[in-house]
Image (cartoon, rainbow, N blue to C red):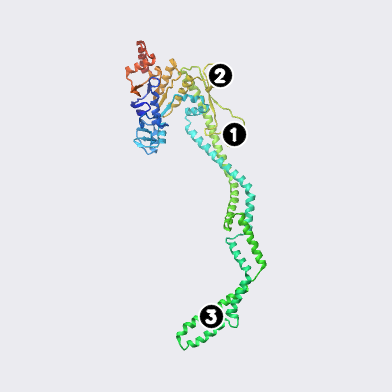
Amino acid sequence: MLRELRIKNFAVIDEMALEFGPGLNVLTGETGAGKTLVLNALGLVTGGRTSSDVIRQGEEEASVEALFEALPEAVREKLKEGGYRDDDELVAKRVVSRSGKNRVYLGGGLCPLGLLAEVGSGLIHIYGQHEHQALLRPEAHLALLDSHGGLEEKLEEMKRKHDCVARDWERLRDARMLIDKRREEEALLRAQLEEILQARLKEGEDEELKERRNILIHSEKLYQGCKEGEEILYEGDDALVGRLGRYVQRLREVASIDAALHPVVELLSASLAQMEEATSALRRYTDRVQYDPETLETLEDRLAEIGRLKRKYNGSIGDILRIQEHLSRELSALTRTEEEIPNLTKALDESRRSAWELAESLSVERRRIARRLKREMETEAEGLGMPGIVFEVHFQEPGPEQDETPFQSGGKQLTKLGMDQVEFFFSSNPGEEPKPLAKIASGGELSRLMLAIKSLVMVRGDIPTLLFDEVDAGIGGRVAEMVGKKLKKVAASHQVICVTHLPQIAALANSHYAVSKETVKGRSFTEVKKLGPKERIAEIARMLGGVKITDKTRQHAEEMVKRGSLTTD
């Protein structure tokens, strides 16, 4: 319940502090005095949208602070989840700055705006001046019906199941599209892969082939060069190996005289061995190297094939081999995707069946709730001065068969809300066929019907404070008194704060606040004052009598207040 509200520099409100009590709290005052500003401030401190336009002219920031007590369990759980102290009281504060550095506080600590909005929605429901216009939109009727039936948990489950169907359908559709696309490309992929596989490429093969080709091209030159080396080292009459061998033999004889020459003998002996090894190597090479036109032609053909593939695939042999791996994976993926189709189809069938079963169950329950809502609405409407009305909830019949998807069946459409589309029908005159409420109800009727629906829905809810902003628009006289009694009845289980222009409603208040505006030195100031018994009578007399208040008007006001204090429902 809202216990206290403090507002500073908000629009034309300079500074004010209000204490609210249980039951029915009403705010009255002349048109334009600023009654709705109080409700707007409450909307701000419970997470509503705002801008710097709400800041009073000449000030840098505006603030709204509210004290709530006897918090609902759902709100306390939300606060605990957010890391805030679990207490029976809560202070919420919102500061709006021209600099854009807005701040939000819960329990004295900073908090995100999103958390304030979540907590605020569990503390206060604001029924604005134009909320009854929702009755003009058939798409809003289903939400009102579901709220009346308390179907929130089932709707959450329905949304999850619908999302599951959408996810499974998207996966299956994507897999099929991928298969179709890959099948179109499969022939090309297989041709490319076969071409590369047949080439039997090896990393670095082109460089190796170029070296071999170079040797074959210069084979004669290589042969002659090596033969010349053999001649110099070993074959000729004056070959180096023979001459050196004879000298080494002579040097050994000399070294036998002086041992100091032994190292020289060893060095020359080693050189002789190396020269003989070199000669053997040259001989083996000349035996191997020879000009072979057929082999050269084969090498040239292989290099030409490699060059063509490198140009075609715009890369090196390594790049082509990586393309080969990619093509293999693509073709394997096509096979795997085809194998996945039965599993994906089965998953979709299961999620679709589950979602449609829940939608059918939800529809059956909605029809039961609709019958109950009809009875209760007609009873409520009679209590609001609309006897003999007919109120019905019409369920849209299935349409023509459509393209079969998981979301269509027998002309019905599956959505996150189930399979139903409903519209409220209404007849205010006995004997007349009910017609779409949006087309025939007057403004006053809409306002009263919405109050009836809200009272049915909210009495079952856990939101402790309900705000009504001029719910009495378009009504008066006896009907106004009935509306007041309805608000009084709702106030028996909720704290109700109501802005009204009707004395019939104001007279029923448990707490009465007068809103006034005055201009001082060219600036407007709005003030709110809680009225005592005599002040209440004067205010209701003003509402009854207008500019000139007579003794008779004052007596009438006094009688209304006395009757209102005795009214319990």
Tell me: 489 left or right of 220: left
> Which residue is under mark 2?
433
Q: Where is residue 322 shown, x and y percent of the image? A: 57, 55
> Which residue is under mark 1?
409
Amino acid type shown at disc 3:
Leu
Amino acid type shown at disc 2:
Glu
Q: Quadrant of the N terminus?
A: top left
* Residue neighbourhood size for the residue with mark 1, other residues' Cα within 10 Å, grouped as few (<14), some (14–19), many (≥20): some
Q: Where is residue 330 shown, x and y percent of the image? A: 59, 50
Seen from this angle, which residue lies furthest right? 294
Q: Secondary structure at mark 3?
A: helix
Q: CA distance from mark 2 to mark 3?
A: 128 Å
The reply to whether residue 123 is visible in this rendering is: no
Q: CA distance from mark 2 to mark 1?
A: 31 Å
* Residue neighbourhood size for the residue with mark 3, other residues' Cα within 10 Å, grouped as few (<14), some (14–19), many (≥20): some
Q: Nearer the viewer, residue 522 or 261?
A: 522
Amino acid type shown at disc 1:
Ser
Q: Where is residue 57 shown, x and y percent of the image? A: 37, 28
| Disc nearest the viewer among 2 and 3 | 3
Q: Quadrant of the C terminus?
A: top left
Q: Earlier in the sequence, mark 3 or mark 1?
A: 3
| Disc nearest the viewer among 3 and 1 | 3
